[in-house]
């Protein structure tokens, strides 16, 4: 039996522990700034974690659950999802989820 010395950060529970906890929120801030290329006045300084369960706006819609959902001090919301396999349905799922956290904002940023 092979024993792993470290937990794989690509696994769901480990990913959420690294990026989705108050204790480690500075890691998420640095990750978002790096991946989005934010620096200077555009750099994210602070985030607030939000519920990862996004209830449907109308009864016929599906409930969505994401790995990490947060917003910065400017009110911009970010969905952080880890996908380790190529899922044919992921793009449709992402398009379905994207508008939900940003319905209150005037602008949607796509990456």
Image (cartoon, rainbow, N blue to C red):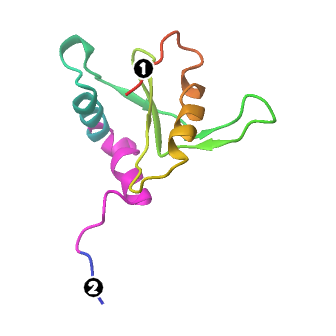
Percent coordinates x, y for residue 55 in the rendering: 68, 36
In the image, is residue 103 above or below residue 47? Answer: above
6 in magenta: yes
Name the residue rendered at 53%, 29% in the picture: 98
Which of the 4 image quarters holds residue 58? top right
Q: What is the secondary structure assignment of the residue under circle 1?
A: loop
Q: Residues within 10 Å of mark 1 (few under 14, many from 20)?
A: few
Direction from residue 69 to residue 26 in the image, left or right? left
Q: Secondary structure at mark 2?
A: loop
Q: Quadrant of residue 30?
A: top left
Asked if residue 84 is positioned above or below residue 108 in the image, the reply reads below
**Residue visible at 31% across and 57% down?**
9
Report, in whole angstroms, how far the alpha carbon at label 2 lies from the one at label 1. Answer: 43 Å
Point out the residue furthest to the left here.
40
Mark 2 = which residue? 2
Residue lying furthest front: 88
């Amino acid at each position: 039996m092979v024993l792993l010395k470290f937990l794989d950060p690509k696994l769901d529970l480990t990913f959420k522990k690294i990026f989705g906890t108050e204790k480690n929120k500075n890691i998420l801030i640095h990750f978002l700034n790096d991946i989005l290329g934010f620096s200077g006045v555009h750099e994210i300084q602070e985030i607030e974690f939000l519920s990862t369960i996004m209830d449907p706006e109308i009864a016929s819609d599906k409930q969505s659950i994401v790995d990490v959902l947060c917003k910065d001090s400017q009110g911009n919301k970010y969905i952080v999802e880890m996908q380790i396999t190529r899922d044919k349905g992921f793009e449709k799922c992402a398009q379905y989820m994207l508008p939900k956290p940003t319905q209150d904002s005037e602008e949607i940023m796509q990456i």
